Amino acid sequence: MKKFFPLYAIIVLITCGLTTCILPYPLFSNYTNLSSKDVYNINNFNESEENITSPSAPVSVSNLNWFDTVNTMFKTYQKTRVIDINSGLTYYVYRNGGHNHADVEPIDMENTAIFKQIYGGVWNWARRPVWVELGDGNFVAASINGYPHGKSYIQNTGMDGHTCIHFLLSKTHGTKRVDEAHQQAVEYAFAHRDEIEKYL
């Protein structure tokens, strides 16, 4: 008996395999015997323009702590939309590092030009309130400066160096202190959160 056990096992496996190929699965499903009219009605309903919906999630602006939350949410090399509140201009950046705050660079020359336009065509350290998108429709109040410095990690952007984005209670790299001007800009961005719909 033991000698023939492998043979029996192979026969059972082959029989089961052929059975599942021949018989419909699931055997007693409500959908195994659809009429052509049923198929037509299902396709007509699912492909009808009347049943197409475009749900849009509500846009929100949060004021989140850099060290507790944003540093984890804002991934390195993540492409992110930044909206400058006072000018209404939008540009995109990559985060390339930063521990006390986010170090970023525009993703290309076109976005560098928009970023420089925000500062009137001249690089400077002025703090500006912005909204930074971290997730679809989820924005965080933040502050930028407009003076490239340090290392540049992205080629062909037309900008030598990177700039900074600060969030609630983030710190500078040099002094390792919370920058009051940046925090005022973050506060302004959060206070004007209801205006974001105008820029989307």
Image (cartoon, rainbow, N blue to C red):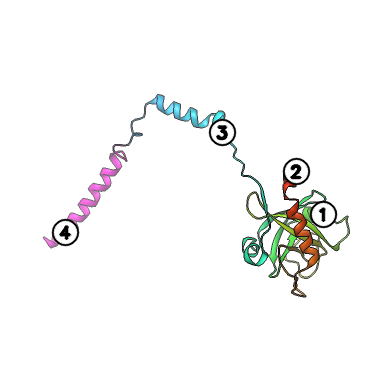
Q: Which residue is mark 3?
A: 52
Q: Where does the magenta region start and end?
A: 1-28
Q: Mark 2 to mark 3: distance in Å?
A: 26 Å
Nearer to us of marks 2 and 3 is 2
Q: Which residue is mark 1?
A: 113
Is tag 1's residue or tag 2's residue first in the polypeptide sequence? Answer: 1
Asked if labels 2 and 1 touch by Cβ distance under 8 angstroms, the answer is no
Badge 4 local density, few (<14 within 10 Å), some, or many (20+)?
Answer: few
Label 1 amino acid?
A: Ala
Badge 2 local density, few (<14 within 10 Å), some, or many (20+)?
Answer: few
Is tag 1's residue or tag 4's residue first in the polypeptide sequence? Answer: 4
Nearer to us of marks 4 and 2 is 2
Secondary structure of the residue carrying tag 3 is loop
Q: Which residue is mark 2?
A: 198
Is tag 3's residue or tag 1's residue first in the polypeptide sequence? Answer: 3
Quarter of the figure with residue 7:
bottom left
Residue 151, how many percent across, how many down?
76, 70
